[in-house]
Image (cartoon, rainbow, N blue to C red):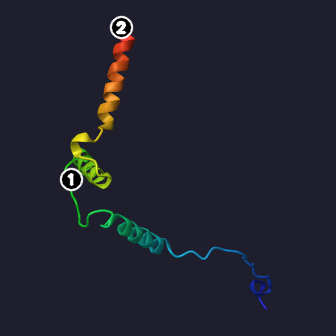
Amino acid sequence: MSAMESQPRMKVVGGKNLPSHWERFDRLQRTAQVLLGRPVSPKGVFRFKTFEEFNEWKENLNRQDHGVAASTYRDKDGIDRRFLEDKLEREST
């Protein structure tokens, strides 16, 4: 008998028997599709020349997801910019 065989085996009690990461991800995607009534994201390969172009495309998708018209969507960067401009103006006077 070798040294490996003489050592007692470790017993694991109450371990989680989870499905693989990919199975859980697939289930999450299918559930989201059922709830939304469409795929979570459009299929295909998308190429963008700049990050700004990508961000604009992604914001349009988010607007569609939330049912907000593009013209009424609040521009976070614009709001931050106006806040900082107002703050600088108040400090300079």
Could you tell me which residue is drawn at 36 percent across and 17 percent down?
88
Q: Nearer the viewer, mark 1 or mark 2?
A: 2
Residue 57: give x, y in percent of width and height. Answer: 23, 51
Q: Taking 86 as reference, is 56 left or right? A: left
Spatial CA span between label 1 and label 2: 43 Å
> What label does residue 29 carry, if any?
none
Q: On the rendered image, what quadrant is the N terminus found in?
A: bottom right
Seen in the picture, residue 15 relative to 40 is either above or below; the reply is below
Q: Tell me the element at label 2.
A: loop
Which residue does the numbered mark 1 point to in the structure image?
Answer: 48
Q: Earlier in the sequence, mark 1 or mark 2?
A: 1
**Other-residue count near label 2 (Cα within 10 Å), few / some / many at <14 / 14–19 / ≥20:** few
Instruction: Tell which of 68 and 62 is nearer to you.
Output: 68
Instruction: Tell which of 49 and 54 is nearer to you.
Output: 54
Q: On the rendered image, what quadrant is the C terminus found in?
A: top left
Which residue does the numbered mark 2 point to in the structure image?
Answer: 93
Could you tell me which residue is drawn at 43 percent across and 68 percent down?
28
Seen in the picture, residue 75 relative to 21 is either above or below; the reply is above
Q: Taking 89 as reference, is 18 left or right? A: right
